[in-house]
Image (cartoon, rainbow, N blue to C red):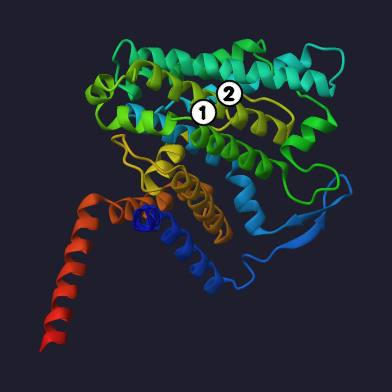
Amino acid sequence: MKKQTGSGFGNALRQLTVPLVAIAILIVFNLIRDPAFFSVTTTVNNTGRTVLAGNLISIINGASELAILAMGMTLVTAASGGQDIAVGATAAVCGSVFVKVLSSGASITGLSILIAVVACIAAGMLCGLFNGTLVSVFKIQPMIATLILFTCGRSIAYWINGGATPTVSSPIVTAIGSFIPGVPVPTPIFIVIFVGLCFGLLFRFTSIRLYMQSVGINQRAARLNGINPVVIKMLAFVLLGVCCAFSGVISVSRLSLINHETILLEIEMDAILAVAIGGNSLGGGKFRMAGSVLGAYAIQALTTTLYAMKVPSTDIKAYKAVVIILLVVLGSPVVKKAFANLKLKWAQRSAKGAEA
């Protein structure tokens, strides 16, 4: 039993190698470039409260929406062997529903915010159910199926609020997107932890993780073992819809308004890259959600580093593309196999040298 546990830990560590190495390289590079880059200080925000500040806080806080979406994207990738390219548009729809519910009342209270969050989650689940139905029932390739919401999702978000960009002025909403009074840590960080704990409990007390991996590895074998691939794939998309809802709420709460055109714009590719950098196969099967979360923080750390280096915003995507290509290539099966062969040859030479 101990041997299996150690082997499992070793496999987990190997899968997390790429995101951990990426983060380590960024840390070393920034410490050389600016030793104070990761220093955490305290400052007084606009409301007069003392909060934590610094690049490290900005990275962890700024990656909140991406980290949550990466968790959901991991499940969809594992179960369906494809990716959802409509997560940004789905988050826009959810955010519009959140704002619509809040702006429809006379005043914003804790109860109305709770109702808005529930409505937002319901909207995300419906979007996920729509995508999941196309993929699991009608056998449409995930990227093509989700292209529908990718194309029209932001228009739906626009229609929900009648083309307006209403604001939601409320201390509670502001606290969701920034800081809870008396707590110096940004609230979105706690939301990421909450979502991660929910998934952890789901995997701990149910067999969802095993079912999704089984369907992703061999759908026919999973069906012969009593697992319904249609239900599992649909569930994966629904859970991703819930993640989109949480990300939409955070994004709206940061600015206290909804802009359907810019909310989480182009975050789809970052979410997919976070899954890939996290060591998860984009072809489905076994997954490790922690890797995707680390991949999200690695992407945000890279973005923050480029901004700190005064790289123009128009050039950041090109720099990110080069770095991400290197990371993905280094984590590819071909490169891993090559390193494994080199390691084996080195071990054989060492053994021969010891015998001599």
On screen, residue 65 above or below 170:
below
Residue 273 coordinates in the image, percent (x, y): 40, 42
Determine the image quadrant of residue 30: bottom right
Which element is circle 1 on? Answer: helix
Kindly identify the residue that appears in the image at 72 percent across and 46 percent down.
186
- Marks 2 and 1, how far apart in space? 6 Å
In this view, the residue in front, 207 or 343, is: 207
In this view, the residue in front, 229 or 125, is: 229
Which residue has dot 1 on it? 88
Which residue has dot 2 on it? 92
Q: Which mark is residue 191?
A: none
Kindly identify the residue that appears in the image at 69 percent across and 16 percent down.
164
Kindly identify the residue that appears in the image at 47 percent across and 14 percent down.
129
Answer left or right for 107 relative to 74.
Answer: right
Determine the image quadrant of residue 83: top left
Residue 88 coordinates in the image, percent (x, y): 51, 28
On screen, residue 53 above or below 83:
below
> Crowding at label 2, few (<14), some or many (≥20) Cα neighbours within 10 Å?
many
Give the position of the C terminus as an image quadrant: bottom left
Answer left or right for 161 relative to 171.
Answer: left
> Crowding at label 1, few (<14), some or many (≥20) Cα neighbours within 10 Å?
many
